[in-house]
Image: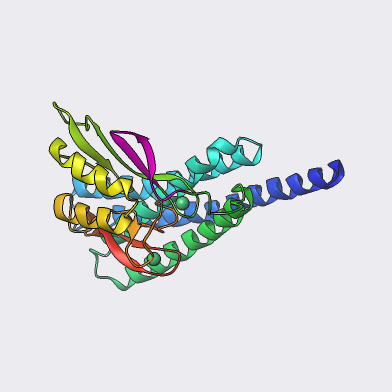
Amino acid sequence: MNDDEKLKESNGLAERIWKIRDNIQELENVKEGIIHFLLSRKKLDDVTKNLWISDVKDFYYNTVSAWEMLNSTSKGNLKYLDDSKNFLHNARSSLAKVISEIKFFKEELVLNLITETENSFENCWSAFYNEFDILTPEIKSTKHIKRVIKVSDSEYHLPCSVCGKISVECKIGYGLFDDHESLVYSGITHSRSLKKNLASELFKILKKRDLSEVHLFMKDYLCDEGIDAYCPECDKIYCWEHYNARVEYDDGFYDCTMGECPAGHRRMIDD
Ligand SMILES: [Zn+2]
Ligand SMILES: [Zn+2]
């Protein structure tokens, strides 16, 4: 590609990213619509009302931040690409929360509001992903991605089988609230500390690179869902993005996180 073509291409990119602001403008109108709706409901106490309004704002401003990060990425700061994706995924989670909250009102108006909000976010989502796909450095081959990475005798990592991003860490160390050393698990939905004396058994399985056995181990000692980043049917690890993880809410309270792998296998990955 010569310099002229490069310039043309980067102009096209900048133009398209600028145009996403139209989608965001539409989202802002939707945000104002929901806030107006909540403010005008009489059967909602002020505390709840304010909480729910702040969730609506969360949803909107996460999308705005995603755009700002995308804009920086397009100017050559590729390190902001992940931030942009994170903000957009946070926006999707906040949206799920908002929808579960406004469903409290059994009014026909609510159904329209939900459809309108979902459609306008869907438009944003695909506009963003169109650019993400172009900007994400091409993964030439997944062959070089290891199933298990041994960092040291007391630390192992499991990378995403699609992009190589570290999705699970198992190590001896201190969890956030630990006052003594534990076996610390950090996955795509949560971190938790297990008894340190379980480490030798786990590390033995990790050494064999047997993910299904690690999954069973986690089902026994961590939680019913096992490794949150693992699809048992594919026998593969996926990061949050490639597991297409989605948080679900019930009346504004966290319900669970569902994952759907690139092959379409769906399961609950956190409860
Ligand atoms: Zn990935
Ligand atoms: Zn799968």
Snapshot quadrant of residue 33? bottom left
Q: Position of residue 49 (x, y in %)?
A: 24, 49
Q: Residue at x 35, y 68 (%)?
A: 233
Residue numbers of the magenta segment: 146-158
**Residue 193 in sight from this viewpoint:** no
Q: Main secondary structure of the magenta part?
A: strand
Which is nearer the eye, 247 or 162?
162
Residue shown at 80% from the left, 43% from the top: 7
Q: Is residue 75 magenta?
A: no
Residue positioned 46% across, 49% down in the render? 88
Quadrant of the rendered structure where residue 78 is? Answer: top right
Res. 228 in view: yes
Quadrant of the rendered image holding ligand 2: bottom left
Front position in the image: 124 or 135: 135
Q: Is residue 179 above or below residue 225?
A: above
Furthest-bottom residue in view? 108
State the image quarter where residue 150 is shown. Answer: top left
Q: Residue at x 33, y 40 (%)?
A: 156
Q: Is residue 199 left or right of residue 111?
A: left
The reply to whether the magenta stretch includes residue 155 is: yes
Q: Position of residue 199 (x, y in %)?
A: 20, 40
Residue 18, given in percent of the width and then of the height, sits at 65, 47
Q: Position of residue 87 (x, y in %)?
A: 44, 45
Q: How is the image coloured?
A: rainbow
Horizontal arrangement in the rendering, residue 11 relative to residue 192 (left or right): right
